[in-house]
Amino acid sequence: MPAYDYRCRSCRTTFEKTQRITEPAGAKCPACGHEECERLITGGTFHLKGAGWYASDYGGKTSPAVEAAAPACGTGSCATGACPALAAD
């Protein structure tokens, strides 16, 4: 379930509430108990973690940068930063 940010219209406290997407917007303030809180528009989270996410997530395709660097040494280690041809520069 997604978490939504709310701000109390009475005491201006901001808080987070986990709700179903189909639930109507609305929350009770945990600080003052006021029933009229507004849902805030916040940025979503999007993370690309780890090296090589492109090559591992798209069915074995390699990124254009890896393909361009591969002919330099022929070892295939250019994507990991251990390319002997790039180290000589």
Image (cartoon, rainbow, N blue to C red):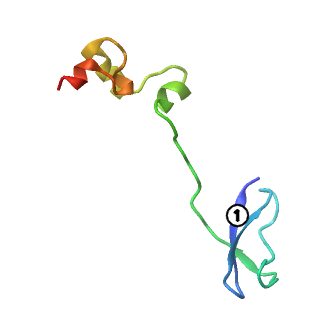
- Relative side of 45 to 39, left or right: left
Observer-nearest residue: 83 or 44?
83
Q: Position of residue 69 (x, y in %)?
A: 30, 22
Amino acid type of disc 1?
A: Tyr
Q: Is residue 84 above or below residue 7?
A: above
Relative vertical location of residue 18 with respect to residue 62 in this rendering, above or below: below
Q: Which residue is located at x 77 percent, y 68 percent? A: 25
Q: What secondary structure is marked by label 1?
A: strand
Instruction: Find residue 31 and report its horizontal and vertical position in percent.
Output: 76, 81
Quadrant location, the C terminus = top left
Q: Is residue 47 above or below residue 35?
A: above
| Residue at position x 43%, y 23% in the image | 62
Q: Quarter of the image holding residue 7?
A: bottom right
Q: Residue at x 77, y 56 (%)?
A: 21
Q: Is residue 63 left or right of residue 46?
A: left
Q: Nearer the viewer, residue 42 or 47?
A: 47
In the rendered image of this protein, does residue 43 appear above or below residue 37? above
Name the residue tied to disc 1: 4
Examine the image and state in which quarter residue 11 appears. bottom right
